[in-house]
Amino acid sequence: MAGGAVAGGAALLGGCVQNPRDIRIGFLVKQPQEQWFQDEWRFARSAAREYGFSLIAIGAEDGDRVLSALNTLYARYAGGFIICAPDPRLGPAIARFADQTKLKAMSVDDRLTGADGRPVPGIPHVGISARAIGTLAGASAAAEARRRGWTIAETGILRISFDTLETGRERLTGAVDALRAAGYPAAAVFDAPQRTTDTEGAFSAAAPVLTAHGGVDKWIVLGLNDETVIGGVRAAEGLSMKAADIIGIGIGGSEVAIADLSKTRPTGFYASVLLSPRRHGYDTAIAMYRWIHDGRQPPPVTLTSGTLMTRDNYRSLLVREAAA
Ligand code: GLA
């Protein structure tokens, strides 16, 4: 009899439109200490406040933590989750979990893939238009080098890379292609693979490469995010290079970039491509809410754009972003 009562209760619940307050959405990020992810969470929380659902923010820095976070969400009756996984190849395991538990899953920033590198079908994704944003970074570096009167022959391009991540590879491919189109030869590009995508990981990757090419006078520093480029710029500055001889262009435009751009004296960090954590945090949380509440599935892929932010325009851009 008790079983019948439970089944009846479930049927009744199934027939009701869910109260927003009963909707719980998980938001899992791979690097909770990184400003970008803090910003995504902040915007997702503001969506939760506005729509009345609960947001469960969890940092998941490796595969084990992802799996235990997913179990926690299931135990807490979450209706779905948004994830930027520490390794995109967790895709099949995440998709299997979502399938078995009926939790709805979306990815943000880093697209989930199978072991073959192909996207996992059925998981809507929101990411940046990586190649176009990389192109903007590379073309802007070339324009600034021209403005400073640098010759191509005296300039090195430090490509701090994290090529196992598709969005990282695409960003740098776009940037290097734009510099090649501006006349820089392939021999001017120096790879510095980083183990981690933070400032420390970039600094350790960049320092030996810069030291090994001490004869190069001017450097363009590229990487997949602001933290990476700041690490490369600090390594160059640490080797006594002048700020005027370094053009670092990051991607993100968050606090870490603004801190450098707003210093009284210019540093080697020349610019950042400003992204929209609001679209990645607020919009994704609402898309998930609508999926759970109204059964409206988000589009399979949404790609967001970026704007070049320098010392000259960062204040006005931030005012615009705040008003959006
Ligand atoms: C990746 C990077 C982050 C950030 C996001 C933006 O996840 O690791 O630093 O740039 O993309 O989508």
Image: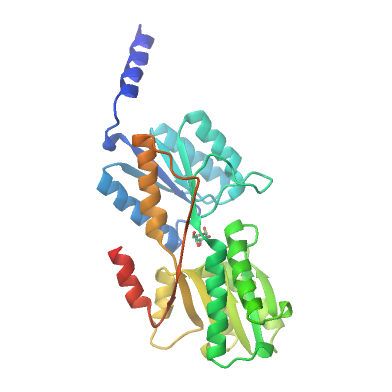
Residue at 53 percent across and 72 percent down: it is 136
**Does 279 sit above or below residue 157?**
above
Residue 178, percent from left and from top: 61, 74
Residue at 44 percent across and 37 percent down: it is 72
Residue 17, percent from left and from top: 29, 29
Location of residue 190 by image quarter: bottom right
Residue at 47 percent across and 40 percent down: it is 105
**Residue occupying the far right of the picture:** 187
Q: Is residue 90 visible?
A: yes
Residue at 31 percent across and 19 percent down: it is 12
**Residue occupying the far bottom of the picture:** 149
Q: Is residue 231 visible?
A: no
**Does 100 sit above or below residue 73?**
above
**Does 305 sit above or below residue 121?**
below
**Residue occupying the far top of the picture:** 1
Q: Quadrant of the N terminus?
A: top left
Tag count? 0
Location of residue 292 by image quarter: top left
Left or right relative to 156: residue 106 = left
Left or right relative to 88: residue 269 = left
Residue 77, percent from left and from top: 38, 32
Q: Nearer the viewer, residue 222 or 177?
A: 177
**Does 166 sit above or below residue 76?**
below
Residue 31, percent from left and from top: 49, 56
Colour scheme of the picture: rainbow
Location of residue 224 by image quarter: bottom right
Q: Quadrant of the C terminus?
A: bottom left
